[in-house]
Amino acid sequence: MEISVLGSGYVGTTLSACLADLGHDVTAVDVDPDVVDAINAGESPIHEPGLDELIEAHAGDALIATTEYAAVPETDVTFLALATPSKSDGSIDTSIVESAAADLGAALGDADGAQPHPVVVKSTVIPGTTEDVIAPEIAAAADRPVEAIVEMGMNPEFLREGTAVEDFTDPDKVVLGAEGERVHATSGRCTRRCSSASTPTSSRRESGRPKRSSTPTTPCWRRRSAR
């Protein structure tokens, strides 16, 4: 699969490297040119056991980093993996996610795709943010109705510092939320390849209500075979 990941911080870098190691072609987008240069040079911008080896192995081939959004509309799915720091009152700051959503919307609007683009949120956000904040931001920047430009999903991360690569490749759970069949199936293709004994829990919105479902998993050692 062709996958784009917006944000190359802790979660985004781990996600990009691990997806590349599973055989996907990954475009990592970040606003920091130093981070982009490091990834393209085969160096991890963060310290995490096992990550240096993955990036060194796949940089310039299955993993490409850029500051531009031009290639994003051509990918099969986009993951938002951006920071949501805490404000002084304890609430989360979604300004970074909103800014990336606007840039994504502009790129999707310029591309004028025939189908809504699957977008999966991995950033830590409160319930309702995906539908009430992120999707409208993308649609406004694209100058298109939400349903015409994007199909939203949610795949929260459960990565722990020091064991993030292991947590990705051998998770104890995978949670998916989706508002449509296309984003549900697309995001599921990504996560099933990094699940071994775990069973993903997913929900699909039908007639305004979520539907629970479980899908079979595929062992994570079947790598470099997803293209």
Image (cartoon, rainbow, N blue to C red):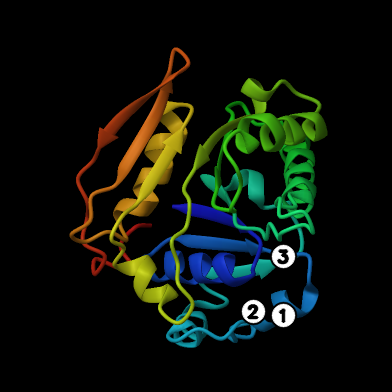
Q: Secondary structure at mark 2?
A: helix
Identified at 81% across, 35% down, the residue is 141
Q: On screen, 40 above or below 145?
A: below
Q: Secondary structure at mark 3?
A: loop
Local crowd at mark 1 within 10 Å, few (<14), some, or many (≥20)? some
In the picture of the structure, the residue carrying the numbered disc 1 is 37
Identified at 75% across, 50% down, the residue is 100
The quadrant where residue 169 appears = bottom left
In this image, 57 relative to 106: left or right? Answer: left
Residue type at tag 2: Asn
Q: Residue 210 in the image: x percent, y percent? A: 40, 24
Q: Residue 127 in the image: x percent, y percent? A: 57, 37
In this image, 66 relative to 221: left or right? Answer: right
In this image, 209 relative to 95: left or right? Answer: left
Q: Residue furthest front?
A: 89
State the separation of the CA atoms marked 2 and 3.
12 Å
Q: On screen, 174 above or below 130?
A: below
Can residue 62 be spotted in the picture?
Answer: no
Quadrant location, the C terminus: bottom left
Identified at 75% across, 52% down, the residue is 93
In the picture of the structure, the residue carrying the numbered disc 3 is 30
Q: Earlier in the sequence, mark 1 or mark 3?
A: 3
Instruction: Kindly check if marks 2 and 1 are in contact, taking CB atoms under 8 A apart as contact.
Output: yes
In the picture of the structure, the residue carrying the numbered disc 2 is 40
Front residue of 107/155: it is 155
Q: Secondary structure at mark 1?
A: helix
Identified at 38% across, 64% down, the residue is 23
